[in-house]
Image (cartoon, rainbow, N blue to C red):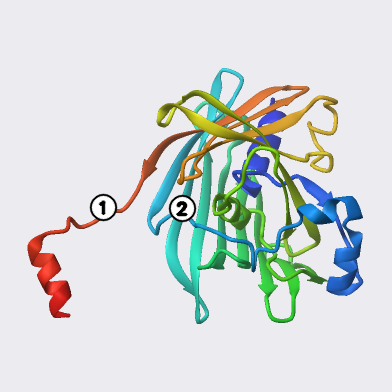
Amino acid sequence: MHRSVTQFISLLILSVLPAGLLDARTEEGAEGILEQLPPELEQFRVDPLTVPKSPPFIGGEALRFRLGWGVFSVARASLNCVEDTYGEEPAWKISLETRTNGFADPIYKVRNHSTSWISRDVSRSFEYRADQNEGGRKRDSQALFDTENLTGSYFNKLTDDRRGPVDILPGTFDPLGIVFFLRSLDFEVGDEIIIPTSNGKEFFYTNVHVIKKVKRKFKYGGRQEAFVIEPDIKDVGGVFKRSPDGHIRFYISSDERRLPLRMESEVIVGNFWAELVAIEEPELEPVTEDSVAVAEIK
């Protein structure tokens, strides 16, 4: 069970929507990267800088998740989004914190915190940090994305491990920021979406399939309609590599919020899941005649 729980939680830490990796490593620059994508898939590649987007989230949004293995609840996660700046650029600061509970702590204690800074128009990533403490093993890493020179670099502060620079494409996202990019897209059943992605050490494409729409009951919001989304997992490895029929499936609300309601995976060692259980949002000041009058004066 140790390794099973660890691999599942590690996948969630990479992203609430873990990346299915369509490997496209290259040392030939941006043009070489484009050549690595098979021609039959080029039509599905999106350009985050130009594709129409409607971000459904607001500053102060906090999504609360419960993670489980089979019938056991093993961890909780919180996905937060606040308005921020990165240098002089308006940005979204996205944070994912994951903690195992009292049941899982004696088996494999996890206290992880990941942070992503993406542009306010949700078109590219600036930086990704991961402070991980899993079973006594620690990592404090940073991925930086130079959006002008189109390079990414990686640095693990605890081991002094440095990687890069690697070439990236305009509009490249990190594994956490890509969640909010996907939430900003207006997709439909049958769509295949290929997104440029990097962790600072390498460049790759994330390939997501919009399988169908279903109506079912969820912990948050009760019975509602949701898109079923599946990423390619052929390069994820671990328990998925050993499971011929293994898959990761996500349920994204079909309304304008595009909420990640649930994640499910089936692998050789059992079923894992993550369920949205609560949302916290900033309280908006009520509109009154006095506030309207003040606004008009200003």
Say which quadrant the C terminus sits in.
Answer: bottom left
Residue 185 position (above or below residue 120):
above
Mark 1 sits on what residue? Answer: 283
Give x and y (percent) for residue 288. Answer: 11, 59
Disc number placed over residue 43 in the picture, else none: none
Residue 16 seen in render: yes
Residue 6 seen in render: no
Residue lying farthest top?
A: 71
Give x and y (percent) for residue 268. Answer: 78, 22
Left or right: 281, with 9 as reference point: left
Say which quadrant the N terminus sits in.
Answer: top right
Q: Which residue is drawn at the image coordinates 85% and 29% (left, top)?
A: 242
Tell which of 174 and 142 is nearer to you.
174
Give x and y (percent) for residue 274. Answer: 56, 32
Q: Which residue is drawn at the image coordinates 44% and 69% (left, top)?
A: 84
Q: Amino acid at mark 2?
A: Pro
Q: Which residue is drawn at the image coordinates 49% and 42% (left, top)?
A: 259
Q: Amino acid at mark 1?
A: Glu
Left or right: 234, with 72 as reference point: right
Residue 105 position (above or below residue 112):
above
Residue 185 position (above or below residue 142):
above
Give x and y (percent) for residue 143. Answer: 68, 66
Q: Which residue is drawn at the image coordinates 79% and 42% (left, top)?
A: 236
Work out how far the residue at label 2 is from the one at label 1, CA to CA, in angstroms.
16 Å
Tell which circle, 2 or 1, labels the residue nearer the N-terminal end.
Answer: 2
Disc number placed over residue 56 in the picture, else none: 2
Tell which of 238 and 138 is nearer to you.
238
